[in-house]
Amino acid sequence: MVILFALIVMRMTGAIVLNPMTGRSEIPALVKGALTFAFSLMLFMWTGGRLAVAPKTWFEFASMALRELLLGFTIGFGMELSMTVIRFGTAIVDYMMGLSMAQVYDPRSGAQMTVSSGLYTTFMMLVFLVNDGHLRFFQLVFGTADKIPFGAVHFTVELPQFMMKYYCECIIMGLQFAMPIIVIELLAEVAIGIMMRVVPQINIFAINFQVKIIVGLVMLFLLFAPLSDMIDRVWRDMFDRIIVIIDMMG
């Protein structure tokens, strides 16, 4: 029972630590540890879990624990990849608006992020919570106990290829996310160029940046509703990918 619970803790640790919701750096380590222990205890008591085979040596136990941890990390990383859609898309948007240098510190990742990236990342998390995505996520994590017995995690050569393909799909969705604003900004550039040719007396450097920023901000707010549908599609696609990942590691 002790070995089974230890393997459950390792699997849950990987899923929680790399989760963009619960793995944020501003969340104290004590809180993360408490969440891991609580969910592990729930999984141990409610589902019981299955131990594929009892380890005979400490080396076998360490190998099982490492594979359980990597399973949780892979699930959490699949969720982290979905955030790439917004980060990449909003980075392009801020570049087109001329705000790529206006960056703020992101305490979650410990890196700099653009203004609209912080706005839409928060909005993406709200959409996730409103649609009960957190419940669906833990439902999938708990469901791994039925699909993959503890101690029986396997890694195939198809898994890295699948993760790379999923990453490429996230980059493409990020471009789709930014495409409406890219088109509008390019049209604004053309309009400013025509205005400069028609009225040469206009100081184009005095209005170019202001126009790009104003047009970009207006489009960001006007596209909140359509982009929210795309964000919801990103989350649903993420859950489908996580199910495939779990099946590949079973």
Image (tube, rainbow, N blue to C red):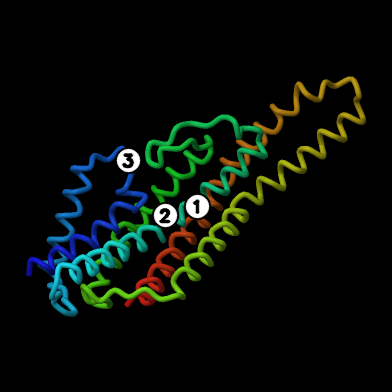
Local crowd at mark 1 within 10 Å, few (<14), some, or many (≥20)?
some
Q: Amino acid at mark 3?
A: Ser
Q: Amino acid at mark 2?
A: Glu
> What residue do we see at 62% from left, 54% from top?
175
- Residue wearing tag 3: 25
The vertical placement of 80 against 119, above or below, is: below
How many angstroms separate mark 3 from mark 1 (CA)?
A: 18 Å
Disc 2 secondary structure class = helix
Residue 74, position as x, y percentages in the image: 37, 63
In-image side of 180 versus 62 (left or right): right
Mark 3 or mark 1, which has the lower sequence index?
3
Residue 146, position as x, y percentages in the image: 23, 77
Looking at the rendering, in which quadrant would you find the C terminus?
Answer: bottom left
- Residue wearing tag 2: 80
Residue 145, position as x, y percentages in the image: 22, 73
Residue 178, position as x, y percentages in the image: 62, 49
How many angstroms separate mark 3 from mark 2 (CA)?
A: 14 Å
> What residue do we see at 56% from left, 62% from top?
168
Disc 1 secondary structure class = helix
> What residue do we see at 50% from left, 52% from top?
84
Q: Amino acid at mark 1?
A: Thr
Residue 84's mark? 1
